Amino acid sequence: MKEVLTGENDWIRLLYVYELEEQLVVKYYIKREFYLSVWHKKTDKTMNVKSENIVDDLGMGGRFPLPVAIHQDKIIGAIYPFDVDREKVTDKRLIALLDNNPEDSNPILVFYRLN
C-alpha cells in the first residue's frame, strides 16, 4: 500500500465515485495531481481531465472545487480561502465571501454541475 500511495508509478490513487441522475463523476489522483472523470449516462460521453485544467464560469480564482458530496442534481465542492487567487476571481458573491473571511477560515461550499 505504501508503494501505491507514495511510489513513482502512475497508479490511480484514492478513487471517489459520485452518482447523479444523469452523470457518474469520479475524482481520483495520480501521484499528487487530481483528476476528474465524468460519464454522461444519456449521451454515453466521457470526459477525463486534470482538475487544474477545468474552466469554470464563476471565476473562482483558478481553484476548481473538487467534489465532496452530492445534493439532488448538483455536486458539492469546497474551496478554501487560502487556495484562491483573489486577483483571478470574477464572481462578485465569491469576492464578498473572501473579503469577509480570513484565509484560515472554514471552506466555502460551492454547488455546481459539470457540462
Image: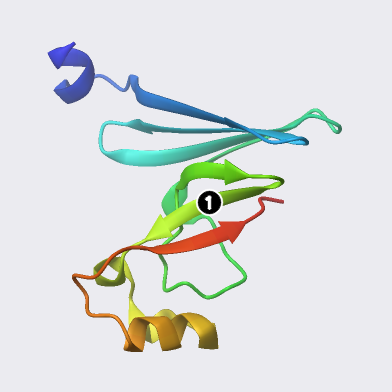
For the residue carrying disc 1, how many other residues have a C-alpha within 10 Å: few (<14), some (14-19), or many (20+)? some
Q: How many marks?
A: 1
Q: Which residue: 69% across, 36% down?
A: 20
Q: Position of residue 69 (x, y in %)?
A: 51, 42
Residue 65, by quadrant, is bottom left
Q: Secondary structure at mark 1?
A: strand
Q: Position of residue 17 (x, y in %)?
A: 52, 28
Query: Which colour scheme appears in the figure?
Result: rainbow
- The reply, left or right, for residue 79 in relation to residue 31 is right
Q: Position of residue 108 (x, y in %)?
A: 40, 66
Residue 45, by quadrant, is top right
Q: Which residue: 52% across, 84% down?
A: 93
- The reply, left or right, for residue 82 in relation to residue 51 is left
Q: Is residue 103 above or below residue 25?
A: below
Q: Is residue 13 above or below residue 97?
A: above
Between 65 and 47, the residue placed more toward the observer is 65
Q: Is residue 21 above or below residue 89?
A: above
Q: Which residue is mark 1?
A: 76
Question: Residue furthest toward the top?
Answer: 1
Q: Position of residue 91 (x, y in %)?
A: 54, 82
Q: Which residue: 62% across, 70% down?
A: 57
Disc 1 marks a residue whose amino acid type is Ile
Q: Is residue 28 above or below residue 88?
A: above
Image quadrant containing the N terminus: top left
Q: Which residue: 67% across, 53% down?
A: 113
